[in-house]
Structure formats: structure tokens, C-alpha cells
Amino acid sequence: MTSTVPALGTRSAEGSALQAVLLDMDGTLVDTEGFWWEVEAEVFASLGHTLDESWRHVVVGGPMTRSAGFLIEATGADIALDELTVLLNDGFEERIDRALPLMPGAGRLLAELYAYEIPTALVSASHRRIIDRVLTSLGAHHFSLTVAGDEVPRTKPHPDPYLAAAAGLGADPVRCAVIEDTATGVAAAEAAGCHVVAVPSVAPIAPSLRRTVVTSLEEVDLTFLHGLMTEMR
């Protein structure tokens, strides 16, 4: 599966306050943030290095090139970035082939958005090969558009992925609700001008203007999302 991302543009904010819902993948819809860390630890162990648990907060939620580059520098491992990226993607695919647990409330929320025909996009820093694997479990029909981290000039924490998703759905970013689990993803969504619902998975995230923090997707439904936009207006 591929995504087609047109030139950035927006639609008038008239009409429905909520124009689209944009969702992160790892740690938000699927319980895989721990998988990535386990794979990283295993790969570096095979290279003779032990990862420090404190680094987990540094590598979570961002593009693989940033995370892999950081770990190479931190450990001094003798491996090229592109070679490490292949090893990490291979290891992750093996993990999700064995099990791919959904986050609590994820399946119900996706079904509700689909039933009410809310334009929905999956926006991930993961590569296309990983997204397409995960979509077999999430159900590709739940998403009008998917944006992968290796398909945009700059991925999270830059706003490009969310601006591209909003444009692809013909939505004004200001009228989009983004659901994220990491500070990196939240930064990307807020830089794009979206209202963010943060569901922290690894590190705490504080509420702020245009950012609502919940403990689980079980607290989020369409009424909740419409309410955020109504309050904003």
C-alpha cells in the first residue's frame, strides 16, 4: 500500500468544527513502543553493547534515523545507520508477526470513526513497510489516508506529516484532532496547528493550551472529540 500526499492546502473551517481525526500508530493504537525498545536492545546486544534504560525516553516516538543514530553514537557501535535501520525493521516485523496487541479502546474508537464517516488518517514515524504490516491488524479500511515517516521530507517532531495528512483529507489543521502518545508526536501535531489528545505511553505529558491529556483511549469517543472543538470555538 502507498499513500498519495498532495500539495499542502486547507479547506474552509466553515461547517463541522471537527473535520478530521489524525492518529499516531506505535503506542497510540498498537502497544508496540516496548517492542521497539526490546528489538533495539537485542540488536545492540548482538553487537556487544548494552543499552541504558534511560535512553528509552530519548528514542521513543521519533524517526528511526534519529533513534538509531543516537544509539550508535551513545554506544559507539561499529555499524552503519542504513544497516542498523534494516536490522531494526526486520526485528520489529518479526515481533509483530508473533503478536500485535491493540491499545485499550483503539478498536472501538476506529470502528466509531468509520461508522460515522469521519475522515481519518494514520500518521506514523515508522516506515511504510512497518505501517502496511500493522494495517493488516488495524484494518486499512479504517483510514482514508496513511502517512509514513519515510514518505515526508521531515518527520516528527516537524509538522510535515500532520500538515500532509490534513491536506490529503482536505481539512484545515486547526479543525483536526490528533491523538498521540509521545512528546515528539505532540510537538509535531501542535506545530501543525492541530488540537492534540495525548495518551502518554512511556513518559508523562502535561496538558496545555490545545492539548488534552487522558489516561486511555477508552476515554475518547466521537462525542469527546466534538466537545474539544466546541470548547475551542
Image: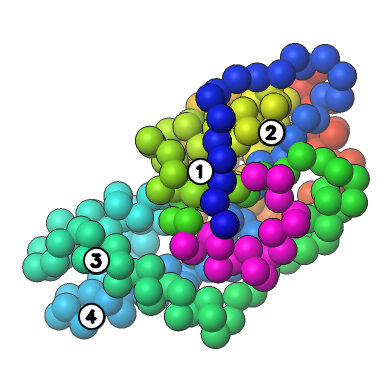
Tell me which amino acid carries mark 2.
Leu
Tell me which amino acid carries mark 3.
Leu
Earlier residue among tags 3 and 4: 4
Report how far apart the C-alphas of labels 1 and 4 lie in the structure: 28 Å
Asked if labels 2 and 4 touch by Cβ distance under 8 angstroms, the answer is no
Tell me which amino acid carries mark 4.
Ala
Asked if labels 3 and 1 touch by Cβ distance under 8 angstroms, the answer is no
Q: Is residue 140 magenta?
A: yes
Asked if labels 4 and 3 touch by Cβ distance under 8 angstroms, the answer is no
Residue at x 75%, y 57% (from the top left corner)? 141
Query: Badge 1, how many Cα within 10 Å: few under 14, some, many 20+?
Result: many
Q: Which residue is mark 3?
A: 84
Earlier residue among tags 3 and 2: 3
Q: What element does badge 3 sit on?
A: helix
Q: Which residue is mark 2?
A: 169
212 shown above or below 218 = above
Earlier residue among tags 1 and 2: 2
Q: Nearer the viewer, mark 4 or mark 2?
A: 2
151 shown above or below 200 = above
Q: In the picture, which quadrant includes the N terminus?
A: bottom right
Q: Nearer the viewer, mark 3 or mark 4?
A: 3
On screen, residue 174 versus residue 16, left or right, reads: left
Q: Nearer the viewer, residue 155 or 152?
A: 152
Magenta-tinted stretch: 129-145
Q: Which residue is mark 4?
A: 45
Identify the image quadrant of residue 76.
Answer: bottom left
Q: Is residue 80 magenta?
A: no
Asked if labels 2 and 1 touch by Cβ distance under 8 angstroms, the answer is no
Q: Which residue is mark 1?
A: 185
Tell me which amino acid carries mark 1.
Gly
Earlier residue among tags 1 and 4: 4
